[in-house]
Amino acid sequence: MIKRITHYFIPAFLAIYFILAFLTIVLKSKSEIFPFFSFKLYSKVPNGFTKYDILYNKGEENEFYLINENATLNKLERKNFMYRMNLLGSQYEKSGKLSVENYSDFLSEGETAFLVKVSGDYIKAVRDNEYVVEIIMELK
């Protein structure tokens, strides 16, 4: 019985796919060969997150965050605030100091305001609302 080309197609295709997929790893290339994607793409699962936020009225009944658990923000406001909070957080990480002159619109809310670092595991944060809040400094 003569083996047909279909008997060789799947093993040959898989061999070529794996060679091309691992080629980007072996060559330490940051590019991908379409449609043969690097396995680095699939191996990096998001394990955790770190973001900056402002905590208003700490320890009181009406305690709330600027971004986290704030359902009143629309998508554009949330993106804008997250971008500005990341700038503020990276400024603090680089120099250890903050200049909050450009952030006066954040400080108009609440009686007190603290810059906080919110970190945790994505799955626990979504499923169980568990995350770690570290107070960095008092803003107001």
Image (spheres, rainbow, N blue to C red):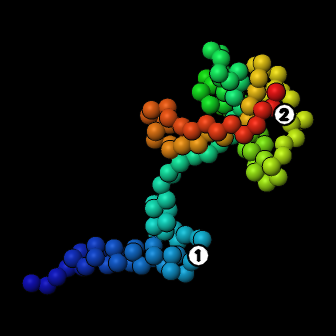
The quadrant in which the N terminus is found is bottom left
Q: Residue furthest left?
A: 1
Q: Would you name the residue on which mark 1 appears? A: 29
The x and y percentages for residue 102 are 88, 36
Locate residue 110: give its quadrant: top right
Write the residue at 44% across / 34% down.
127
Dot 1: few (<14), some (14–19), or many (≥20) neighbours within 10 Å?
A: few
What label does residue 56 carry, if any?
none
* Distance between mark 2 and mark 1 Cα atoms: 41 Å
Can residue 74 be seen in this snapshot? no
Position above or below: 13 against 133: below
Kind of residue at disc 2: Tyr
Q: Residue at x 61, y 36 (%)?
A: 133
Where is residue 112 shown, x and y percent of the image? Answer: 77, 23
In the rendered image, the residue lying farthest to the top is 61
Q: Earlier in the sequence, mark 2 or mark 1?
A: 1
Image mark for residue 103: 2
* Three-letter code for the amino acid on which mark 1 is drawn: Ser
Q: Is residue 54 visible?
A: yes
Residue 83 as seen in the image, left or right of residue 101: left
Quadrant hosting residue 73: top right
Provide residue 98's location: percent of width, then percent of height: 84, 42
- The residue sitting at 66% across, 27% down in the picture is 65
Element under label 1?
loop
